[in-house]
């Protein structure tokens, strides 16, 4: 069973607090989307920080101090990987990046987060069907890699993603519907 992780994207601390308060108590992990404007609130649940910024290094320490259990970056460097002693490091991979380009890097991180939408930083985009081939390609080379899928995940495509052997599903605008449908089972 893939973990369902709600994604929170907020433009203000107040909006962040409201969105966090709406997350069901049973949720074990929250995904915080971090854009160039650093928005933060008090976190009562374990969380991962998705640093969708041009240079993650200057803010990694700040998010680790805030309590992040996982940090997702789109640019790996030796300095970023040094943080593996403190937190799980995930590699975020945009749709336009060929899987073969990231294969050598996959060994250096705790998990790979495949983006399944073309445009990051907004919620509500549909899942790009090419994600299924990308999951398969990564699984064939690294069958034990933890794979997270982020973007366009909802109740209508959840089962297909789970059947594709995805470990974690990051869900933004479709979270409530998906969570409700899964809690009824």
Image (tube, helix red, strand yellow):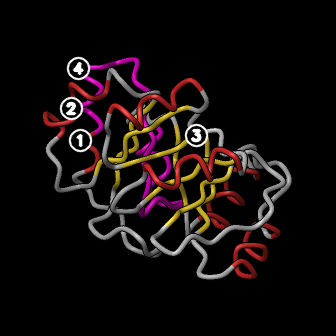
Circle 3 residue: 70
Nearer the N terminus, badge 3 or badge 1? 3
In the displayed structure, would residue 81 be above or below residue 31?
above
Q: What span is colored magenta in the figure?
A: 135-162
Q: Secondary structure at mark 2?
A: helix
Task: Give the Cα distance between marks 4 and 1.
Answer: 11 Å
Residue at 75% over, 67% down: 41
The numbered disc on residue 90 is none
Task: Give the Cα distance between marks 3 and 1.
Answer: 22 Å
Q: Secondary structure at mark 4?
A: helix
Task: Give the Cα distance between marks 4 and 2.
Answer: 7 Å
Q: Residues within 10 Å of mark 1 (few under 14, many from 20)?
A: some
Circle 1 residue: 134
Task: Give the Cα distance between marks 3 and 2.
Answer: 24 Å
Camera-nearest label, 3 or 1: 3
Residue at 33% over, 62% down: 54
Q: Is residue 118 magenta?
A: no
């Amino acid at each position: 069973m893939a973990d369902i992780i709600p994604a929170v994207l907020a433009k203000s601390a107040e909006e962040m607090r409201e969105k966090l308060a709406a997350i069901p108590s049973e949720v074990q992990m929250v995904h915080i989307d971090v854009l160039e404007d650093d928005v933060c609130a008090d976190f009562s649940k374990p969380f991962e920080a998705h640093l969708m910024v041009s240079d993650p290094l200057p803010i990694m320490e700040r998010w680790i101090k805030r309590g992040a259990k996982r940090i997702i970056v789109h640019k790996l460097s030796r300095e970023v990987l040094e943080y593996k002693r403190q937190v799980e490091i995930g590699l975020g991979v945009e749709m336009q990046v060929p899987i073969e380009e990231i294969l050598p890097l996959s060994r250096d991180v705790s998990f790979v987060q495949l983006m399944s939408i073309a445009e990051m930083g907004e919620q509500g985009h549909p899942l790009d069907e090419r994600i299924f081939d990308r999951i398969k390609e990564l699984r064939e080379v690294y069958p034990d890699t933890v794979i997270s899928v982020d973007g366009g995940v909802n109740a209508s495509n959840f089962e297909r993603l789970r059947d594709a052997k995805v470990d974690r599903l990051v869900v933004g605008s479709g979270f409530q519907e998906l969570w409700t449908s899964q809690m009824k089972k």
